[in-house]
Structure formats: structure tokens, C-alpha cells
Amino acid sequence: LDSSPSEVDLKKQRIINVVGVNGAGKTTFCAKLSKFYKDKGGNVCVVAADTYRAGAKEQIYSWCNKNGVDIIVNNSKKDPSSIIFEALNSKDQKKYDKIIIDTAGRLQNSSNLMNELNKIDNVISKFDENHSNWITLDAIAGQNTISQIENFNRYLNIDGIIINKMEGSAKGGFLISIIKKYKIP
């Protein structure tokens, strides 16, 4: 996120779907990313599609409220795909330069949760939008991140990687293997 304003294209990849395992920092990253684009002059919205983690909607709502970013929350639905469909189908969605989707954490070895991720990607694709799927990785997880990328990539195309929790003792050496093998920015 150290790009200068001239390097930030607010129209490119209008929809960013943020995925990853539990505890990798997806919600906090979505909040920071939405503020980044807002500070660059973009009209930004976050879709709260984490219907599993207790407090997830409240956490992202609090961040968005603090940062002055619009948020779409649906407390009556449990299916994240239907929340995303409604958000992208709403008449107001065209006013946003960026729509950032905060999804629930999921273990890469849970086929039901991974199939749900594929369903989310299919729903977004129905809107004929240029979207991307970014995976958050916990720097502490080390070489386990390679299997996360492999498994997530089976269910949706991973277009970008975010490394969180670099302040620990982990140095992120696994990135070299991931970049070499998958060529993901």
C-alpha cells in the first residue's frame, strides 16, 4: 500500500474479494485497504460477508464508521453469497470505485467451506465485473502458506497476496517459493 496516488488506478479491479484462513487478518486488512482507497479519493464500500465469526460484522462496521467508509451489512442472512449478490445487485453499487468483500476465514482442508468460496467467486463473476481475489497469509504460518495457496487456488483464482503479522519473528521467506511457483503479486 505504499503506492503514490498516480500509481493507484481506482477503476482497475473494482471488486476485491479478500479470502484466507481463520485469524490471518482479513477484516483488519479490509478496513485498512478501504481507508487507503478512500484517502486516494475513491468512493469505497465494504461488504461484510463474514457470517461465521462472532463479532466480525461489528468489527468491520466499527472500522468503516471510524474511517468514513460505506458498509453493507445484512444481519438477516447467513449465506455470504446471497449477501454479496444483494450488495452487487443494489442500485447504489455503481457509485463505488472500489467494493471490498470481507469473507469468513476457512480452513483449506474443509471442502464445504472451500466450495462456498467457489460459489462466492461465481456470484461475483455473474456481474461481469473485473474483480480479483486476494488471499491474506499470516507470516507466522511459514511454509504452511504454500499449501494454503495451493488449496485456495483450486477453488478460485488467486490474484494477489497480502502478508500480515510481519512484526513477529517470521521473516516471510515462504514468499520466494510462492512467487516463483505461482507468479502471484
Image: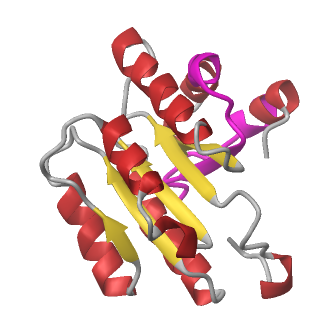
Front residue of this view, candidates 158 and 10: 10
Front residue of this view, candidates 98 and 158: 98
What residue is rendered at 54% in x and 47% in y?
A: 17
Farthest residue in the front direction? 91
Q: Viewed as shown, does residue 2 lie left or right of 30?
A: right
What residue is rendered at 47% in x and 37% in y?
A: 20
Instruction: Indicate yes or no whether the magenta region holds residue 84.
Output: no
Q: Viewed as shown, does residue 147 lie left or right of 67?
A: right
On the image, the x and y values in percent for residue 50 come to 30, 45
Front residue of this view, candidates 152 and 17: 17
On the image, the x and y values in percent for residue 171 come to 64, 47
Q: Is residue 180 something that shows in the picture? A: yes
Magenta residue span: 151-177
Residue 108 location, quadrant: top left
Q: Is residue 156 above or below residue 74?
A: above
Q: Is residue 138 something that shows in the picture? A: no
What residue is rendered at 67% in x and 49% in y?
A: 129
Residue 37 location, quadrant: bottom right
Q: Is residue 17 above or below residue 78?
A: below
Instruction: Indicate yes or no whether the magenta region holds residue 162.
Output: yes
Colouring scheme applied when the structure was drawn:
secondary structure
**How many labels sit on residues?**
0
On the image, the x and y values in percent for residue 154 come to 62, 16
On the image, the x and y values in percent for residue 21 come to 42, 33
What residue is rendered at 61% in x and 50% in y?
A: 162
**Is the N terminus in the top left, top right, bottom left or bottom right quadrant?**
bottom right
Q: Is residue 47 above or below residue 61?
A: above
